[in-house]
Amino acid sequence: MFSEKSGDKWPGILTPEDVFLNEHLIMDIIVKMSSIEKKCRAYLIQKNELYVPFPQREDMLTVFANWKDVINMMRKYKSKDIKKKVFDKLDELRHFRNKVIHEFLALVNSGETELPRWMNLLFTEGYDNLKSVETSFQNTMPDEDAYHALKGLDELLTSRGKKGIKFIKSGLKEVEITSNKSLILKFQSNTYEKYKQAIAEISKEDLQGWTKCDDVSLVSTS
């Protein structure tokens, strides 16, 4: 690999800056980290952990909760698929994600020719950790349909001026997507009627378009 930029300090030689500030590589890394973050959220939803404790506020829907809090909740499910050391790597990856977005991305196309040593080290270790986490998740492929359905439903409800399901006070207790793409939502009895009415006022076409499910039905739980 060679540097093709004219006026380089080291003509013909690929420098760390050429790699670490490469727009295509940076975007590829961000996409991969976002995919892993989504898998974390989908994993919890698959375990019916629909709400994650949120400091100083109500528990928040897993699709919106801070990634840090999602990772902490995942720790209770450490298993053969996700070993304990992976959670530490996820925390490191979350830190790297923030640095890539706020530090490295800002320098793309900036003309920067020499990064400080700490940035070189951070990128190298962060990239190695990303590849390690990707390998660890190869055998953990949660179904993401419920993730997209819940997120879409909340966005749809709030866009129509109705109460969403973002916080635990919504009373949503369980979610299931059947083999024929029917979304079944189980609500506490004290909020069931409110959400049943709200969803009844939305067209089937909109429900399908926003949740990517063919049908949405509600069940009341005691």
Image: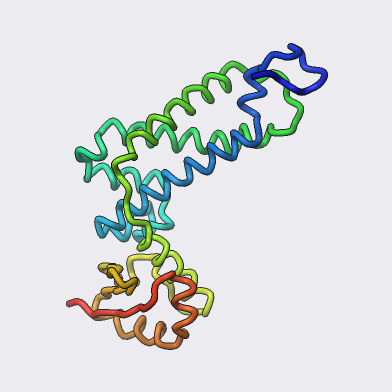
Q: Is residue 37 above or below residue 188?
A: above
Give the position of the N terminus as an image quadrant.
Answer: top right
Residue 91 lies left or right of residue 104; in this view the side is left
Give the position of the C terminus as an image quadrant.
Answer: bottom left
Camera-side residue: 106 or 1?
1
Q: Is residue 156 above or below residue 135?
A: below
Q: Position of residue 165 (x, y in %)?
A: 39, 69
Which residue does the image show at 26% across and 67% down from the upper left? 174
Q: Position of residue 45 (x, y in %)?
A: 31, 57
Which residue does the image show at 38% across and 87% down from the upper left? 197
How many marks are shown on the rendered structure?
Answer: 0
Q: Residue furthest left?
A: 222
Which residue does the image show at 66% across and 17% down from the upper left? 15
Residue 42 lies left or right of residue 76; in this view the side is right
Q: Is residue 5 above or below residue 68?
A: above
Snapshot quadrant of residue 91: top left
Q: Residue furthest top?
A: 10
Camera-side residue: 62 or 203?
203
Which residue does the image show at 47% across and 41% down from the upper left? 33
Q: Position of residue 23 (x, y in %)?
A: 66, 35
Snapshot quadrant of residue 168: bottom left
Q: Is residue 200 above or below residue 221?
A: below
Q: Position of residue 20 (x, y in %)?
A: 61, 26
Protein image colouring: rainbow
Residue 153 lies left or right of residue 85; in this view the side is right
Camera-side residue: 17 or 107?
17
